[in-house]
Amino acid sequence: MRIEDIYGLYKLSYKVVKDTREDVKNALYFSLKGESFNGNKYALEAVKNGANYAIIDEAQYKVDDRLILVDDALLCLQQLARYHRAQLNIPILALTGSNGKTTTKELINVVLNKKFKCLSTKGNLNNHIGVPLTLLSMTPEYNFGVVEMGANHQLEIEALCEIAQPDFGYITNFGRVHLEGFGSFEGVIKGKTEMYKHLKDADKIVFVNQEDPIQMEKSSGINRTVFGGEGADCNVAFTDADPFVSISFEGIEINSKLIGAYNFANIAAAVCIGNYFGIPAPEIKDAIEGFTPNNNRSQIIQRASNKVIMDAYNANPNSMDAAISNLASLSDHKKVAILGDMFELGDDAILEHQKIVDQLSAIDLVAVYLVGETFYKTNRLNSNMHKFRSFEEFVKLFEGNSYTDTTFLIKASRGMALERTLDYI
């Protein structure tokens, strides 16, 4: 079946699902496959439960006229998304980077919604499946789209840009993340700037942080709008971060609910993009001040007299460094760091974890708890540092402590699930 014909099936409801545990009624179901599942097995169940049609790619499951056989269901999903993108007469902004993608995306979304009916990527559905699903969720009522793009190998951003065909782009930063896949920090830069190349070739526009020399260098020669200090197209000034970030823009003070100076660039990008699209400064202020972080990203959680900086959704050397530096800068008197392993660092894993331990040794903290097999292999420098191979070992010691009036930083890669610590504070 031609992609134009499949598009006709999609337009019956503008609804796509890939899991029969979702609401499949009136949807177009795609039989995707993974290491431990085969969506073809559930295609008939999907249509019996109300899906209009199901896309399959294994002939043995073609047992109903509503099951549409294609060569590759995933490729079909991607082709359908690109075809839909070509029919959309709306601007799309693509967003990638090593740190802060999701927070920045959500800030941009709330700002743009002051003027547009804007849809952005849900959660972090930012890969070769998530990007097509995001595009296909852009029904006719929307007039702006923001698409988050993630990658851990070369050529992934290029492929996602080919699907999304963005009109605008922004790279949050370049960090030592996914080194196992990218191979090196230089590999990270090369992979992320595939977005710049796509936008340059298409004569589109990028937003650039003037304070990031790599961004400035790599975006040279591209049609760009720059934000930052003096000389920038959009002047945004940092005011304070103790603990919440405050900024100044066009003489207006904006007080966010985001912690850490490292979130300044994320806020500034949203301000710049909103300003570019003609949203008045007071409305930008209202949008940013109304945004509350969640999902264990830069949250502040109160536990009796204790304050918890919960940033356990993900971690890499750059974001860990920034979170620790922010903890050190706070005026709070009693501070404790509870940190878990950072994943996907390849051969540099122990070295990068040791750098974090070295950084911690120079900071005046009541205690440091390091959790995970890699942190356990580092050389402990101070007597206030405690290492544990597992969360269970950590809890045995930690739950016996009675902290009061203390500020905790909890940060780790997602797989560590370190937010479980909240049950013991």
Image (spheres, rainbow, N blue to C red):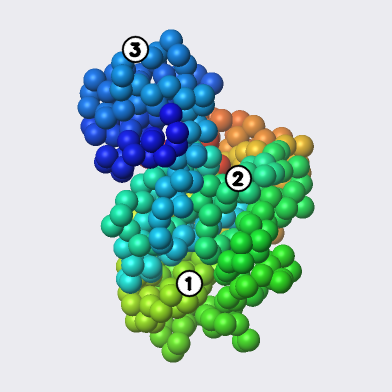
Q: Earlier in the sequence, mark 3 or mark 2?
A: 3
- Could you give the CA–CA distance between mark 3 and mark 2, rounded to whole angstroms? 34 Å
Q: What amino acid is at disc 1?
A: Ile
Q: Residue at x 27, y 28 (%)?
A: 51
Q: Position of residue 72 (x, y in %)?
A: 51, 26
Taking the view exactly as shown, the residue that stands out farthest to the top is 60
Residue ID for mark 2:
159
Numbered disc 1: secondary structure? helix
Is 394 rendered above or below residue 261? above
Measure how far apart labels 3 and 1 are at the Cα level: 50 Å
Q: Secondary structure at mark 2?
A: helix
| Image quadrant where one finds the N terminus | top left
- Residue drawn 47% across and 25% down? 70
Q: CA distance from mark 1 to mark 2?
A: 24 Å
What kind of element bears circle 3? Answer: loop
At label 2, counting other C-alpha atoms closer than 10 Å, the crowd grade (few under 14, some 14-19, many 20 or more) is some
Judge left or right: residue 8 versus residue 108: left
Q: Which residue is mark 3?
A: 63
Tell me if I can see residue 223 in this picture: yes
Residue 12 on image: x %, y %:
27, 39
